[in-house]
Amino acid sequence: MKFFVDSADVAAIAELNDLGMADGVTTNPSIILQSGRDILEVTKEICSIVSGPVSAEVVAPGAEEMIAEGRKLAGIAPNIAVKVPLTWDGLKACKVLSGEGHMVNVTLCFSVNQALIAAKAGATFISPFIGRLDDINLDGMDLIADIRQVYDNYGFETQILAASVRNVNHVAQCALVGADVMTAPPAVIRSLAHHVLTDKGLDQFMKDWAKTGQKIL
Ligand code: G3P
């Protein structure tokens, strides 16, 4: 499973990239707001750090404007994936932009049918939002599993990019059900290393080591 970093925090992205844990990056208007930076500038900087796909989202409501915005965003770097919303206009933009050879990430997916039509419109990635389904007492992971089955049934090549990943359990479950990619904030990716028994075991090893009076260096 590929790891994308759901952030525009350049320092955090660079650290994860150095560790081999940034196969790509996803952004959205909220993430750009949080960064406090200009979308074109920060996206260009991210693309210079990460060699994999970097999603940058259009904001226009209509297909024609989305296509124009998408072309401009795609001009930032060859590894841009243009992100469009899962609306009828977004699907029209997806079809045109993917037909021009651009990677397209169709976002805000909350149903299998939405994922099905995004694949038919040529999406490179489909982004189902797990956490936001959990928020309304549905099971976001069921949606990932259902899309996996439908895409496999018909051989769609659209990659399932599990988004709105909020915790380590989401990451493990994404890997178990076969998401192609999961995107998570840097803090969630870092917390994958944490385990209470690791901390407890290391604490004991350090106490015992101190008692030996030895040094390695
Ligand atoms: O990848 C989509 C993500 O940025 C949304 O996450 O936690 O706001 O639902 P969240």
Image: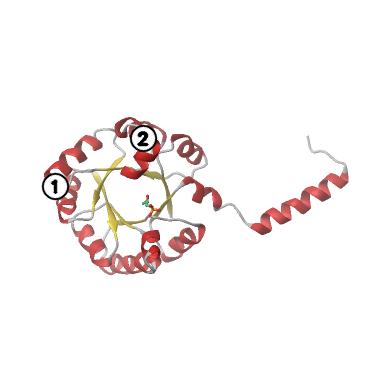
| Picture coordinates of residue 117, whole percent (x, y) | 20, 61
Q: Secondary structure at mark 2?
A: helix
Left or right: 187 as drawn, with respect to 35: right
What residue is drawn where x is 19% and y is 55%? 87
Foreground pick, 163 / 157:
163
> Where does label 1 land, which residue?
62
Task: Quarter of the image for the N terminus: give it.
Answer: bottom left
The answer to whether residue 93 of the structure is visible from this angle is yes
Of marks 2 and 1, which one's residue comes earlier in the chain? Answer: 2
Between marks 2 and 1, how big is the CA–CA gap?
27 Å
| Picture coordinates of residue 109, whole percent (x, y) | 28, 59
Q: What amino acid is found at the position of numbered circle 2 in the picture?
A: Cys
* Mark 2 neighbour density, 10 Å: few (under 14) some (14–19) many (20 or more): many
* Mark 1 neighbour density, 10 Å: few (under 14) some (14–19) many (20 or more): some
Q: Secondary structure at mark 1?
A: loop
What residue is drawn where x is 37% and y is 31%? 45
Foreground pick, 193 / 37:
37
Left or right: 38 as drawn, with respect to 122: right
What residue is drawn where x is 19% and y is 59%? 120
Foreground pick, 187 / 13:
187
Task: Quarter of the image for the C terminus: give it.
Answer: top right
> Where does label 2 land, which residue?
47
What residue is drawn where x is 24% and y is 53%? 123
Name above or below for residue 69 compared with residue 89: above
Q: What amino acid is found at the position of numbered circle 1 in the picture?
A: Gly
| Picture coordinates of residue 127, whole percent (x, y) | 32, 55
| Picture coordinates of residue 164, whole percent (x, y) | 39, 55
